[in-house]
Amino acid sequence: MREEWDQMGTDVRNLQEAMQELLEIMPQSPTFFKAEIKIKKSWEKFKKTFNNFDGFISPMKAIAVKEPWNDPEFLSTWKMWKEYLQEQHGVWMRSRSEVMALKHLTDLANNNPKEAIRFLEYAMAGRYQNFFKVKAEESQINNLSNNGPEEKKPTVVKRPK
């Protein structure tokens, strides 16, 4: 398919040259001048669309994704995170994005898979599109002591836009 696409590019360039030659030898009248402008605008739009299509013919190849921990609980939660992003936010995590997200999560969690799981679960519970570092007291909802509910000021967290 790539060879056909390259041939089509050559054909388009040859057509452009032939059209340019034709436009140079045709008589110039006000009607012709308006038609020439319209044709040139349409041609530029076509070339832009044609050039943008090249990315679909030769897409980027995926890179290998290596999870930072071989912890079954983390692997299960990470899979759930990717599915959550697709289901809740319509985001498909591609390989380069996944590699960088895992690197960022490893840094946030100080290389601790249990902390990473806690951050991911907190983000999913709050319907966030991104994960972030969460303080331990923020993630403990309805923390009860022996004497009933703890009395402390509520934590106000502004949701990212």
Image (cartoon, rainbow, N blue to C red):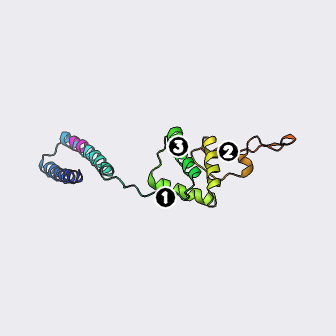
Residue under pointer 2: 158
Spatial separation of the CA atoms under disc 2 and disc 3 = 20 Å
Above or below 140: residue 101 = below
In the rendered structure, the answer to whether residue 118 lies left or right of residue 96 reads right
Q: Amino acid at mark 3?
A: Leu
Marks 2 and 1, how far apart in space? Answer: 33 Å
* Residue in the foreground of this view, choosing between 44 and 149: 149
> With respect to residue 156, does 113 lie above or below?
below
Mark 2 or 1, nearer chain start: 1
Q: Measuring 75% from the left and 49% from the top, which residue is drawn there? A: 137
Q: Is residue 22 left or right of residue 134?
A: left
> Label 3 belongs to which residue?
85
Q: Residue at x 55, y 47 (%)?
A: 76
Check if mark 2's residue and mark 3's residue have beta carbons within 8 Å: no
Which residue in the protein does label 1 denote?
66
Q: Secondary structure at mark 2?
A: loop
Looking at this view, is 55 or 108 the one in front? Answer: 108
- Mark 2 or mark 3, which has the lower sequence index? 3
Crowding at dot 3, Cα within 10 Å, few <14 / some 14-19 / many 20+, comes out as some
